[in-house]
Amino acid sequence: MTYLDYSATTPVDDEVLDTFIKASKYIGNPNSLHKLGTKAKHLIDASTNQIASILNIKPSEIIYTSGASESNNTIIKAMEKFQNRGKHIITTALEHSSIYAPLKQLEEKGFIIDYVPLENGLVKLDALEKLLTNDTVLVTIAMVSSETGIRQPIEEIGKLLKKYPKIIFHSDITQAVGKIKFDLTDVDVASFSAHKFFGFKGIGVLYKKENLIIEPLIAGGKSTTIFRSGTPPLELIASMAKALRLSYENIDNDIIKVKKLSETLKEKLSIFSNVSINSNEYSIPHILNISVKGIKPETLLHSLEEKEVYISTKSACSTGEASNAVFALTKDEEKAKTSIRISISKKTTNQDIDNFLKAFDESYKKLM
């Protein structure tokens, strides 16, 4: 099997699974006052401290959620309580569906949503600043596009928005965590999921600066914070901390390795006359988006699947025929309708790349 769909989800690392199993021995509810509960809470606190240390944030700024989709919904829907400050939100055409869906719900309630212009896939800072008004309450821009891999200058955007203290700056960093280095100093809120860096599905984080008070999406009592209710999932939290630590242990070497694999892919795929490379120099090497003119993405995907090679057509959570992200980047409707995503990781091997290229060549010749 050749798996090249790491941006959709990653397999659970053996060491992460081991941590999950060990944590499952802690049978107490972390919020119980007896010693079994105290023991469980100590493990959660240690895990939270580790996550905070790796991301250079405060433990008190970590809210555990079921994943990035819940985190995104939490911060966007919280804007209803900020209506006295404004009803204008700015985003991009490269966001995840868990951004667009709650934004649409707010739009139906009278919020105004603007999309900042892009240049080569990047947010134009001057254009963003021109869009800001006295009514702007939220700017939400993903650090890395899940479809094209475009890495936005989040740090620069954050510095710009610091001049406007009324505005909350949120970033979905799901496709960045564990893959690249970044700085959250000037980001007010950020979302991510553990299953993107070899952790379990069903656990994620909403990072929120201490001084920002929001309404919880899920109410009903204190969990690890007052901003999200529910019994803390000890095993998932501890295993996420382990997954995060492992993902950053050798990140410099991992990035070099992934970049070499990505360059090989681009070089070999460029030979095919009907193939266009959509990802550009601003894309992280882990995500390579291409279009194959004349072949439906689903048809190509299933042809590769027959050879036990697994890729994706778009973001796993997206709907519709054409890729809005690819169209926003290329302004080419045909490319948007024929795009596929190849996503690799530190666990991808040269043999995986060779297997993919061989299977792609066979499918391309057959389907064309």
Image (cartoon, grey):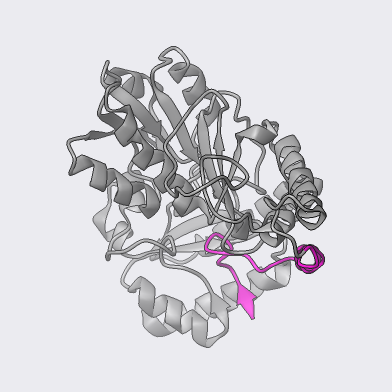
Q: Which part of the image, by quadrant, shows the N terminus?
A: bottom right
The stretch of residues the image draws in magenta is: 1-26
Q: Residue at x 67, y 72 (%)?
A: 352
Q: Nearer the viewer, residue 190 or 143?
A: 190
What residue is drawn where x is 71% and y is 48%? Answer: 255
User: What residue is drawn where x is 62% and y is 56%?
Assistant: 194
Q: Is the residue 44 above or below the residue 107 in the image? A: below
Percent x, y for residue 126? 36, 19
**What is the tally of numbered marks visible in this picture?**
0
Q: Is residue 311 above or below residue 100?
A: below
Measured from the top left, where is residue 177 in percent x and y? 62, 46
Question: In the figure, is residue 258 to the left or right of 217?
Answer: right
Q: Is residue 3 above or below residue 151?
A: below
Q: Which residue is located at x 55 percent, y 85 percent?
A: 307
User: Which corner quadrant of the image does residue 207 belong to?
Assistant: top right
- Residue 293 relative to residue 232: left or right: left
Q: Is residue 23 visible?
A: yes
Is residue 23 within the magenta segment? Answer: yes
Quadrant of the rendering where the C terminus is positioned: bottom left
